[in-house]
């Protein structure tokens, strides 16, 4: 009886399929990673930024803008569409260009302005004012405001300055050390003298002789002195 051989060997077949597919999967994985970077404003190649902006419904685009501004406008597009038509949308649309924007609605003005109108003051600090700048700001506001409102636009130049203060304090002490010197010792004292004197005098008084007994008269002084 001859030895029977299997039609195919499963292990070898699987190894051949994996060996064939491995380069294909490697290319697909690299392509998938590359595609992921194309949809991120931070990693998308600069030459593909206009297409990414179009896919994110960016309404304004200028190839003369610096690349950081282009990426920031694309990154905030979703948030911008969420608040489209609000005061926040207007300020946020002008923020990437470094403008200081202030909006005053008609009921906030003194005196009150026409109903349904707003006043927009835009301060520019890094460039001069010209017609192209005015048109760019005007179009940005028009694309993000409510269509039912009218606005008055005023532009101004903003100058900023930094105040730098500096102070210094100097403190010192001068100490002089002299050698030891035994100076004259002066003592202020007072001397008090006290003198006491005591004097005693004794006087003897005797009666007359006619009344005194003989013993007393024997000791008496008969000279007659008192």
Image (cartoon, grey):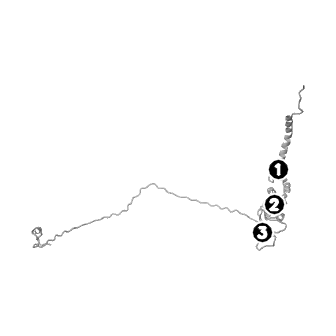
Q: Residue at the location (84% across, 49% down)?
A: 35
Name the disc covering residue 36, or none: 1
Instruction: Decide which of tag 2 and tag 3 comes sooner along the chain.
Output: 2
User: Which percent across, then down, holds residue 109?
Assistant: 77, 71
Instruction: Tell me the element at label 2.
Output: helix
Instruction: Decide which of tag 1 and tag 2 comes sooner along the chain.
Output: 1
Quickly name the residue at label 2. Answer: 82
User: Marks 2 and 3: which is nearer the front?
Assistant: 2
In the image, taking residue 114 as reference, residue 206 lies left or right, namely: left
Name the disc covering residue 115, or none: none
User: Marks 1 and 2: which is nearer the front?
Assistant: 2
Q: Is residue 55 visible?
A: yes
Which quadrant is home to the N terminus?
top right
Quickly name the residue at label 3. Answer: 104
Instruction: Tell me the element at label 1.
Output: helix
Q: Residue at the location (85% across, 45% down)?
A: 28
Q: Front-most of 12 and 164? A: 12
In the image, taking residue 7 as reference, residue 184 lies left or right, namely: left
User: Which percent across, then down, holds residue 114?
Assistant: 81, 73
Q: Front-most of 134 and 183? A: 134
C-alpha span from label 2 to label 3 = 22 Å
Q: Quadrant of residue 20?
A: top right
Q: Where 223 falls versus 34 (above or below)?
A: below
Q: Is residue 155 visible?
A: no
């Amino acid at each position: 009886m001859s030895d029977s051989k299997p039609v195919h060997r499963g292990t070898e077949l699987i190894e051949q399929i994996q060996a064939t597919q491995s380069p294909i999967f490697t290319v697909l994985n690299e392509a998938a990673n590359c595609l992921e970077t194309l949809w991120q404003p931070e990693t998308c190649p600069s030459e593909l930024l206009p297409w990414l902006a179009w896919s994110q419904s960016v309404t304004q685009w200028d190839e003369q803008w610096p690349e950081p501004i282009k990426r920031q406008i694309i990154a905030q597009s979703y948030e911008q569409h969420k608040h489209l038509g609000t005061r926040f949308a207007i300020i946020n649309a002008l923020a990437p260009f470094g403008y200081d924007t202030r909006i005053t609605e008609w009921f906030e003005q003194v005196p009150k302005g026409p109903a349904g109108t707003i006043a927009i003051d835009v301060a520019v600090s890094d460039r001069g004012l010209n017609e192209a700048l005015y048109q760019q700001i005007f179009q940005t506001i028009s694309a993000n405001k409510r269509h039912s409102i009218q606005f008055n636009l005023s532009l101004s130049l903003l100058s900023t300055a930094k105040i730098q203060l500096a102070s210094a304090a100097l403190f010192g002490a001068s100490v002089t050390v002299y050698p030891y010197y035994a100076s004259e010792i002066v003592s202020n004292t007072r001397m008090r003298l006290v003198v006491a004197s005591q004097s005693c005098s004794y006087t003897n008084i005797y009666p007359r002789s006619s009344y005194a007994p003989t013993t007393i008269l024997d000791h008496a002084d008969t000279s007659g002195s008192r």
